Image (tube, rainbow, N blue to C red):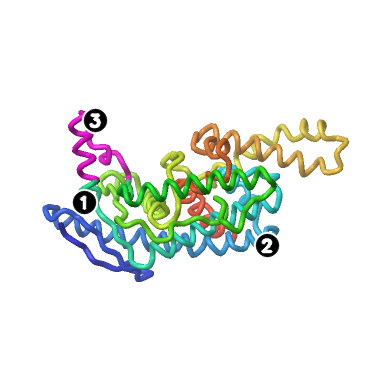
Amino acid sequence: MTNLISRSTKYGVNFNVLVNDSELPQFKTKVKTTCGSWLDDAQEIFDVAIPTCTTALVQPDNVSDRFRNLLSYYFGLPSDCSQERYRACLNAILSRLMRTKSGLFSGVDLADREQMPYLAKASTYVSWAMCKGDPTEHYAGFVWQDFLESWPNAAKQAYKIRKTKWDQKNGWVSTLLGGQLNGGGYEKPLYYPIHLNFNKIWPKGRQYCIITLIHEATHRFAETVDHAYFKDDGSILDKLDPAIRDCGVWKSIYLEELKNDDDKEAKANARVVEQALNQLRGQNPAAKTMQQIGEMEAVNNADSLAWFVHDVALLTLEIT
């Protein structure tokens, strides 16, 4: 096993990458170069997106409607929800993003997929013996949890979901004892490094590699699971405005239906946007899943967080 110790070029993020001793020097060089580059890009994404999310939390009128549309798409948050529900969802997202950023840039341990801990290798050998092949071969990345980590985390997760559902049923969105929307996050990061399947993710392009790194970092440093995976190009920024324009033909019908409503213009526009979002959800089933499970559990979906922070950063750069 070779431990490649390095530092990213732009932000000076320390990182270690474990690879096989038998790998060619070209492979090791590419691993070091690309990991440093991805960490720099991820740092920039977090540095741009987190202040925007903070502004959206404390001054919601100072962010665009497109920001709320991203919340709705990636976390299933209804566009017409109450301010209390909006803030609870955004606070939970921010907590996870800040934990991930802190962990990812405080010196992070990475590893090639094949550098699995012994327990993980044992499980893959069992899978091979049952003629199912190596399951990790198809993963873009993963963070291994052994039994001593997984069962208390699962118990904690189950408690939070039950507790928050009880609170919401009785009129509370968050509680002193800590509901699912209170921010979450493990008391300490998971023990094992972030494993990346370099040979699988390199051909898919830079954006996919960075999203994969952020996705796996939310597993290791924040309380995330895999409810659903968005498609390789999960971003909706380029698709959102055209979808809204296409659905705009229905606005006159909505205005007619709401002709006796004093707030008919705003409500008609909201229906057009919701129809556009549903159209986009039909193209990416993961977004439909987020709508069905609701933000209480969707804020823990690793792919939602990764694509959301990516799109918020691009949205902010577009505006500025």
Q: Distance from label 2 to label 1 (Cα)?
A: 45 Å
Q: Which mark is on residue 132?
A: 3
Ranked by sequence position, the earlier of labels 3 and 1 is 1
User: Could you tell me how far apart the alpha carbons at marks 3 and 1 are, in whole angstroms?
Assistant: 20 Å
Residue 232: x %, y % from top left: 41, 41
239 in magenta = no
Q: Majority secondary structure of the magenta segment?
A: helix
**Amino acid type, callout 3:** Lys
* Mark before the other along the chain sequence, 2 or 1: 2
Residue beneath label 1, please? 115
Please tell me whether mark 3 sits on a helix, a strand or a loop.
loop
Camera-near label (2 vs 1) is 1
The residue drawn where x is 88% and y is 36% is: 260
Residue ID at (45%, 49%) = 224
Q: CA distance from mark 2 to mark 3?
A: 52 Å
Is residue 137 rendered magenta in the image?
A: yes
Residue 223 is left or right of residue 275, and the answer is: left
Pick the quarter of the image with the C terminus.
bottom right
Q: Which residue is mark 2?
A: 59
Q: Mark 2 belongs to which amino acid?
A: Gln
Residue 54 drawn at (x, y percent): 59, 62
- Height in image: 179 above or below 252? below
Q: Which mark is residue 101?
A: none
**Amino acid on which the number 1 mark rests in the picture:** Gln
As drawn, is 155 to the left or to the right of 67?
A: left
Which stretch is magenta? 120-140
Mark 2 surroundings: few (<14), some (14-19) or many (≥20) residues within 10 A: few
Label 3 CA crowd tier, 10 Å (few <14, some 14–19, many 20+): few
